[in-house]
Amino acid sequence: SQTIHQWPATLVQPVGSPLSLECTVEGTSNPNLYWYRQAAGRGLQLLFYSVGIGQISSEVPQNLSASRPQDRQFILSSKKLLLSDSGFYLCAWSPRLAGTYEQYFGPGTRLTVT
Amino acid sequence: AQSVAQPEDQVNVAEGNPLTVKCTYSVSGNPYLFWYVQYPNRGLQFLLKYITGDNLVKGSYGFEAEFNKSQTSFHLKKPSALVSDSALYFCAVRDPRYILTGGGNKLTFGTGTQLKVEL
């Protein structure tokens, strides 16, 4: 079966510091991968998605970047964090199967920028 | 652009009573609809989906949803609520004509409905 991991689970970082959040998927190959941010425990905003190694698309301009160095690894980064980057970051994957459109989410990373 | 609306911020239900969490959608063409549940400080869990076929879709944990094309709705239901069902519920839609570059799927989520089931 497939499993998605995210780490760290929680992170407290000062303004201006760098960020690296990691997401890995097990038990599947060539998945579509997604990064979301959830602010104030509610709405989800799609930040980035990737359909293959090295292929990253950004949905909204911002202080963050994403990379996919391996097939099942997705990394969210920032060179200098802002207070507004605080939130709950969720990684998700979807299989490349005809007729399968749902996404499966990881446990999330709670980021607090102080 | 596709969208979903969850008109209720919070729904309160007594344990054992039926529950309904409402969702309406707006999309051109045939909608692909989903329900997810989120427990505190956890990721979203997939409950069920409607792609085509029977308007009543059954999902995990005894949940079901009814697709109504004329009312553009996809309400989540459960015949008998449990305290453990208390969580945040999200409706989502995929516009089948909106395919991310390379074939990925973009889902648009509602703002969520907090379900509280009390004894």
Image (cartoon, coloured by chain):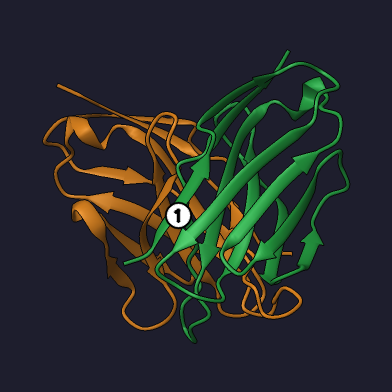
Chain colours: A green, B orange
Image-based side of B30 in relation to B53, left or right: right
Q: Is residue A43 above or below residue A14?
A: below
- Circle 1 marks a residue in which chain? A
Asked if residue B107 shows in the view, the reply is: no
Residue A101 x/y as whole percent: 51, 73
Name the element at disc 1: strand
Depth order, front residue of A28/B37: A28
Depth order, front residue of A104/B66: A104
Q: Is residue B103 above or below residue A76?
A: below
Residue at figure coordinates x 81%, y 24% from the top left: A17
Residue A81 in which image quadrant: top right
Residue B114 x/y as whole percent: 42, 32
Residue B37 x/y as whole percent: 39, 45
Residue A49 x/y as whole percent: 70, 61
Residue B107 in which image quadrant: bottom right
In this view, which residue lies farthest toward the front? Answer: A70
Residue at figure coordinates x 30%, y 69% from the top left: B57
Which quadrant holds the N terminus of chain A? bottom left
Residue at figure coordinates x 55%, y 29% from the top left: A41
Asked if residue A93 shows in the view, the reply is: yes
Residue at figure coordinates x 76%, y 42% from the top left: A77
Residue type at the position of mark 1: Ile
Depth order, front residue of A34/A53: A53
Image-based side of A38 in relation to A63, left or right: left
Image-based side of B93 in relation to B82, left or right: right
The residue that disc 1 covers is A4
Decide: few, some or many residues near mark 1? Use Cα within 10 Å; few <14, some 14-19, many ≥20: some
In this view, which residue lies farthest toward the left? Answer: B16
